[in-house]
Amino acid sequence: MDGARVAYDPGSGTLIRPEGLTAGLRYTVTSTREAPDLGLLSAADVPSGDAVARVLRLGEGVPEQIQRLADQIAAENGAPYQRAVAIEEFLGTHYRISADAPSGHAYPNLGFFLFGPRNGGGQEGTSEQFAAAYAVLARLMGLPTRVVVGFQSATGNGPVRGADAFAWPEVLFEGVGWVPFDPMPKPDTEPRPVEEDFKPPTDPPTEEPTNAPTETAESSAPATPIADAGTSGGALTGAVIAGGLSTLLVLVLGVPPSPS
């Protein structure tokens, strides 16, 4: 970098100018865009533990709808890279970019961006909302994620200005490093309504508890005199047992017994 004195924060990978920006400041940055090996990514795991706790942490009070969306995407994709790509595709397929969308990436802002009515300004946003929504969904799935803020030139080279500021998410993979993802919609594509692919599970109807009987029904069969030891006694005993089973089935099924 030439033309300005900067400091480097290795924890976040950020260049910082301690004096701040001033009118008329000009500087030149030369960078190299890395191309990760897709063969490694498909089988790569993500790190865990204290070393990456900062890029896995989320604020308290994650809205239930956002948690359910993350659970749905995670259930359909197992490997870390598959999940990272699935989030990218979901956001790029269902939302539109709007330079006039209000700024902000707190939970209420992201909830409106993800699930707000389309005819009321929902389901559209700037790169800020796309990147922040990606990061929240990814962290809910256990993917170490950060949001990078830089500039995107319309031509890919040349001067950039404040209006060219741009945000994008990156995921950390073991043996590969930080990998950028692009959740922005493709040009000239019409987004699919979110409701077509995200269907939160409905809670099962609550059944009213059935009052347990307070008394146990006693058999009303008359006592049978015991005959001589022989077949008649055995037959009577068998009839009593069968009658008891028939009564039990009536109580469970709730249907009247058929006449014998």
Image (spheres, rainbow, N blue to C red):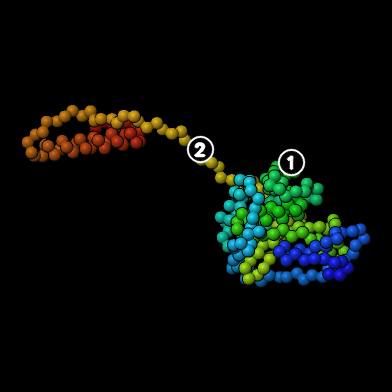
The N terminus, quarter of image? bottom right
Secondary structure under the numbered disc 2 in the rendered image: loop
Residue picked out by circle 2: 205
Q: Disc 2, disc 1: CB below 8 Å?
A: no
Q: Which mark is residue 106?
A: none
Secondary structure under the numbered disc 1 in the rendered image: helix
The x, y position of residue 200, in whole percent, is 59, 45
- The residue nearer to you, when weighing 173 against 254, is 173
Q: What residue do we see at 31% from left, 29% from top?
A: 215
Amino acid type for the residue under numbered disc 2: Pro
The x, y position of residue 3, in whole percent, is 88, 68
Q: Earlier in the sequence, mark 2 or mark 1?
A: 1
Q: Is residue 157 left or right of residue 245?
A: right
Count the marks: how many? 2
Q: Determine the CA span between mark 2 and mark 1.
A: 31 Å
Q: Is residue 260 left or right of residue 23?
A: left
Q: What residue do we see at 63% from left, 71% from top?
A: 175
Q: Residue furthest right?
A: 24
- The residue nearer to you, when weighing 247 against 128, is 128
- The residue nearer to you, when weighing 232 against 143, is 143
Q: Residue furthest left?
A: 228
Let me know if residue 152 appears in the view: no
Please determine whether, in this image, residue 214 is positioned above or below residue 67: above
Q: Residues within 10 Å of mark 1 (few under 14, many from 20)?
A: few
The C terminus, quarter of image? top left
Amino acid type for the residue under numbered disc 1: Gly
Residue picked out by circle 1: 120
Please determine whether, in this image, residue 224 is positioned above or below residue 86: above
Q: What residue do we see at 10% from left, 33% from top?
A: 226
